[in-house]
Amino acid sequence: MLLDAPADEAGVAAAVRAAWAAGEPLLVLGNGSKRAMLRPVQAARTLSAGALTGITLYSPQELILSARAGTTVAALHAAVAAKGQQITAEIPDFSALLKNSAAPTLGGAVAANLSGPRRVAWGAMRDHVLGLRAVNGTGEIIRTGGRVLKNVTGLDLCKLLTGSHGTLAVLTEITLKVLPVPERRATLVVRGLDAVRGVAALAAALGSPYGVSAAAYVPAVLAHRVPGLAGAAALVRLEDFSSFVAYRSERLRAELAAFGPVEVLDEAATLAAWAAVRDALPLAGEEGAIWRVSVRPSAGPGVAAALEQAFGTRWFLDWGGGLVWIAGPATAAAHDAVCAAARAAGGTWLLMRAPEALRAAVAVIPPEPAPLAAIARRVKAAFDPKGILNPGRLRAGA
Amino acid sequence: MIAQLPPRQDVLARREPIVAGLRRLLPPDAVIAEAELLKPYETDGMSCHRQVPLAVALPATTAEVAAVMAFLHREGVCVVPRGAGTSLSGGALPMGDAVVVGLMRMNRILEIDYADRLAVVQAGVTNLGITHAMAGEGFFYAPDPSSQLACMIGGNVAMNSGGAHCLRYGVTTNNLLGLKLVTVEGEVVDIGGGHLDAAGYDWLGLLTGSEGQLAIVTEVTVRILRAAEGARAMLAAFRANDVAGACVAAIIASGIIPVALEFMDRPAIHACEAFAHAGYPLDAEALLIIEVEGSAAEQDEMLGRIREICLRHDPISLKISASAEESAAIWKGRKGAFGAVGRISPDYLCMDGVIPTSRLAEVLRRIGEMSTSYGLQVANIFHAGDGNLHPLIMFDANDADSFRRAEAFGAEILTFCVEVGGCLTGEHGVGVEKRDLMGVQFTTTELDQQRRVKSAFDPGWLLNPSKVFPLPVLSA
């Protein structure tokens, strides 16, 4: 495998231009920490943005930060923490889940649109990307968005490129909106509920005026893998000024008492519990395949139960019940069942981890309806006319 | 008059059969072709531009929209999508050879699901109509453009509308879950739905703010939020714009994100006070309206912290609202700002540039210098937390020279916004207004990349012609 890791954007552009001229496919990545996701890419050459590192602009009072794509997520966290701020998207670290020790990069997190538990309250990674620099499939450098918080000038290619897994362009620099670290964090834990009642409790909390910033449900069988839990539990997080968290904890505790006994986890326990949920640690040690299914929150328990009954899958729920994390047998039959359950609930799926043979053989994300699939092919060609950037990463033959 | 693509003579010559074809697809009252009935559609919120369309179609269902689009596609006729026609950038300005497809009859709320915190509404439901439909349950739809009483959610999606409270709640694109859209060929496609974050390309994000260039949206699934326990506003008046700007930066740096943080300069303060009698201090150079949310005690605490920060910036006056009525009065002046300026000037252009907030004082100084050199007054009202400026340039539309100077003044402001690291438009969209300035912000390579994406959806360039992309459009 030939590896190019240019030190700057011009080097990335030159590498893509050369590949374009030769019609040679490229495996595009940062440090490769998420290679186990989605479909394997067949390419003789690898282009890494991992050497494009460094924060290029950080203005805490404007709530913005720009960094080159290969900057590690860890480096970013350290930089913003020093100014009392945080990356709002609460980027998950899937190292354990994907059994990969490479340091995840900002570019990878954006390319995969990775968002943690705060997604339900503050939006996805794509909601915090203000601007991008990237190299398209002919080696042209393009900018989209900018460094300001509001921007509707032209088509929003930031959204299109975020989550496109390097199939449209190679990200070289990203500008993000950041937010202050809250003064205090706490978690309310409602114990002993089944999934349906648990998600109802989460809905009550998310539908309250108390600014809940995360809501998850962990069944009894996985509870020991989340610090602070001993059995099935619905977890609700508050993040705000100290006095607000104190007041809101009390109000929420009263409202949730109708569902079951409520305990409050302190700051340290809150950080530990939500890191586990964020990184999907309850399933990281499971053998076999891992799926993420996204449905209406109230449909989450039904999807989870149906698959558990048929395949003995293990699961937990984030995003108020709408994100169903599933671990099960790495077989086409199990995958088909996951797809069918997601589809029946009006939702979507992503094959997060599986042996390469399975990933190459199945639809790792839902197929698009014909009119949209035709548009998608033309959009791909609009960026990458020869189809050299991460071919097959999202769909076979695309 | 702004340049348009020349009307296609072959389409104008086929006007009668095209109208007859539309009449076969829609009920009799849903196709408008008579000159006097077309008049109301000749302009939008940017009323300095006018153009009577070929015809207007008013479908009432997605199936009717699809039938109309398929027919017009076969006939090779351009389409101008329209909601309430409140665009401030000419986004719904008709073209003489185009059919306006108005979605105002698609005005039903199809579903409200409080447990899953979403609502499914047709494109012609008004922005405020969504919130009104669930007010009894304490929920709301967050983006709140000034035109929210009239503007429709379909138009909000097309323009990615913002509002005064997006510092906390985001703009339209951050508050959507799904769309039902009709392609230029008349195919119906569902994107997203009740769930978050579909895998694959983010069509939802790309369609939002695409200004009718890619497809027509007929239904929207929006996220709805439970309202906070309460909200309260305060006023802080300062001796100079840069002092107020520094105060804004200090508030943000302290870790407080108010739900709204609005800025008015001296001309805006005077115009709004004369209109709304909100109690704005007339001796101030700059005024901040700051709103916080939460329980009464939480409001007190946050306003107390903000007050401390303001006191370090030598304020002329600070006034914390003591009641919902006082807060309403504070907002009345701000929300009526455009009308207030309309009372002191026969006409005005409302700009929408965005700047890095650290450049605020410098940009306002420069706008003041431009005001002198163009001989036109300007009032500055803007969303200070996110740097979204709304300079209102006052002119007289009956005086051609005054209008020409106003347009040049506006273009110079927006160009300066880009120069200091900002952008041409924060929430009003490019439309026809800023189309010819796109080259200031983007390289030809970048514009060509956007044009190729447009072509992927609309290969014949039939959707909302002569907007967004500088003419001639087809270089890709």
Image (tube, rainbow, N blue to C red):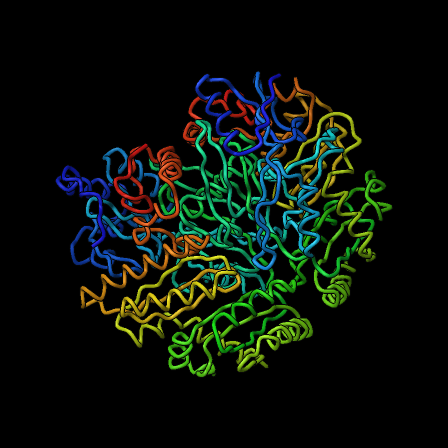
Q: Residue at x 54, y 36 (%)?
A: A172
In-front residue for pair B425/A5: A5
Q: How far across and how far down the image is residue A143, in percent?
A: 46, 41
Left or right for B310, reference B49:
right
Left or right for B344, reference A179:
left
Q: Can see residue B108? A: no
Q: How far across and how far down the image is residue B395, in percent?
A: 26, 69
Q: How far across and how far down the image is residue B367, in percent?
A: 37, 65
Q: Residue at x 66, y 39 (%)?
A: A72
A206 shown above or below A336: below
In-front residue for pair A41/B409: B409
Q: How many marks?
A: 0
A147 shown above or below B261: above
In-front residue for pair A89/B457: A89
**Name of the residue lying farthest toward the left:** B13
Q: How far across and how far down the image is residue B193, in percent?
A: 53, 43
Quadrant location of residue B16? top left
Quadrant location, the N terminus of chain B:
bottom left
In-front residue for pair A246/A217: A246
Quadrant location, the C terminus of chain B:
top left
Left or right for B144, reference B68:
right
Quadrant location of residue B350? bottom left
Q: Residue at x 65, y 46 (%)?
A: A298
Q: Can see residue A234? A: yes
